[in-house]
Image (cartoon, rainbow, N blue to C red):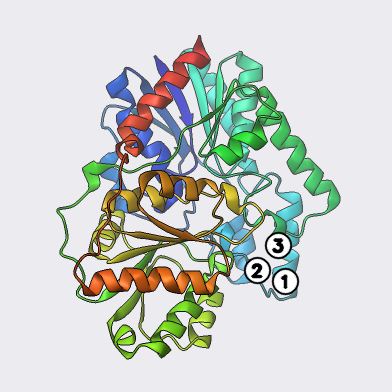
Amino acid sequence: MKVLIITYYWPPAGGSGVQRWLKFVKYLQDFGVEPVVYTVENPNYPILDASLLKDIPETITILKQPIREPNNVVSFFKKKKPNQSAGFLDPNPNFIGKMMQYIRANYFIPDARKYWIQPSVKYLRRYLLENSVDAIITSGPPHSLHLIGMQLKQGLDVKWISDFRDPWTEIDYFEQLPLTKKAREKHFQLEKEVLEKSDTVLVIGKTMKTKFDAFSKNVKVVTNGFDSDLNPEVEKLDVKFTITHIGLMNADRNPISFWKAISELSNESVEFAKDVRIKIVGKVAQEVKDSIQKYAINNVDFEGYLSHDEVRKFQQKSQVLLLAVNNVKSAKGIITGKIFEYLQAKRPILAIGPKDGDLAEIIHKTKSGEIVDFNQVSELKDKIWSFYQLFKEGRLESKSVDIEKYHRKELTNELVNIIKETIS
């Protein structure tokens, strides 16, 4: 059985976007599936992580074609790096910035990689006529890749699986885009068309599945996970009461209630103030730094972006792992990929997000930590203080259960069964 996987994010890309299909590809051959990967020859990735290159199986075929990146033009006028993440939209753009945001939102639909669609369809149609595959899988975002899959399915009558690592019209920053009514309608129309024409739709959580069930009769949940092969030897725990956040922290993910709680606890307890240390690993928005300054929190270390291997060490050393969910309308369906590696690190998790969301369900079922809803400062203080007391007593540990099902190899087995069902 052979599958063609179309993905924009591929090593040396770093960050969460590359992990899902890199890990599936790593294990597919163990279950009798030969992956062929189609990706970009000259991408502009927000972050790079060369350490992930070692996870690519040497025996697989990787196809690459160049892409025209309009972000290069946008960055020239905005004097911004072309690889800025979409989740970091400028909240106070100047006139040129507003104009560029408007153009990008309304003329690059579904996204700035739209100019890769037709060249890819032409190249892959020729490839598929000469090399048969059993199914095509497209991974979005960028959701323009689903349009490649849709055209190939229509032209070649091949089975097609669309994979949504993140939502389309319900992604956290969608409402921030300066979209015209016509552009909004176009997004919803394309999303509906992709869902209806896919033979199978893959999503990462129950909330997204429930929403997509209205458009597709074959929506399957395969979560993200962790990969123990990248797990270093157990690290010695930090001496300080460290609380570590891994991953992007943009304005929507700014945990204001957490900064308030830390500030108040520090004012109430001199000992706590001396012991606590906040570590932030990854890109941080200016709004987050402003909040930290506002609440006079001085014991924060900004580690910046680190390689995947280095991140694992931070996770295992930390006394507590902080997980902040974006405070947006679609928060219930957000399952940040770091939750699974947090589970593997086996340190207590402190999450801030909806108590009735998909993330909360994972934390409760695995008994891996605590989750506090947005703006619940008093409850958050109680949870932090409880963790701190256990730390002082030398008893702060995670007693998580049933996490093995989130191993990437187990998840790949689930995926293979879905591929087989789709083909048959």
Q: Do the numbered discs 1 and 2 sit on residues whose CB atoms are within 8 Å?
A: yes
Question: What SS does tag 2 mark?
Answer: helix
Read off the residue under disc 3. 101
Judged from this view, the residue extending furthest toward the top is: 424
Q: In this view, does 390 lie above or below 218?
A: below
Read off the residue under disc 2. 77
Read off the residue under disc 1. 96
Which is nearer the N-term, disc 2 or disc 3? 2
Is disc 3 surrounded by few (<14), some (14 to 19) or many (20+) residues within 10 Å? some
Question: What SS does tag 1 mark?
Answer: helix
> Which numbered mark, 2 or 3, is in the foreground of this view?
3
Quadrant position of the N terminus in the picture: top left
Which is nearer the N-term, disc 1 or disc 2? 2
> Which numbered mark, 1 or 2, is in the foreground of this view?
1
Question: Which residue sits at x=14%, y=53%?
Answer: 233
The quarter of the displayed image where residue 270 is located: bottom left
Question: Which residue sits at x=54%, y=64%?
Answer: 253
Residue type, mark 3 in image: Gln
Q: Calculate the distance from the C-alpha at mark 1 to the C-alpha at mark 2.
A: 7 Å
Q: Can the viewer see residue 375 in this picture? A: yes
Residue type, mark 1 in image: Ile
Residue type, mark 2 in image: Phe
x then y, percent, for residue 204: 50, 39
Question: Which residue sits at x=51%, y=23%?
Answer: 136
Camera-nearest residue between 195 and 57: 195
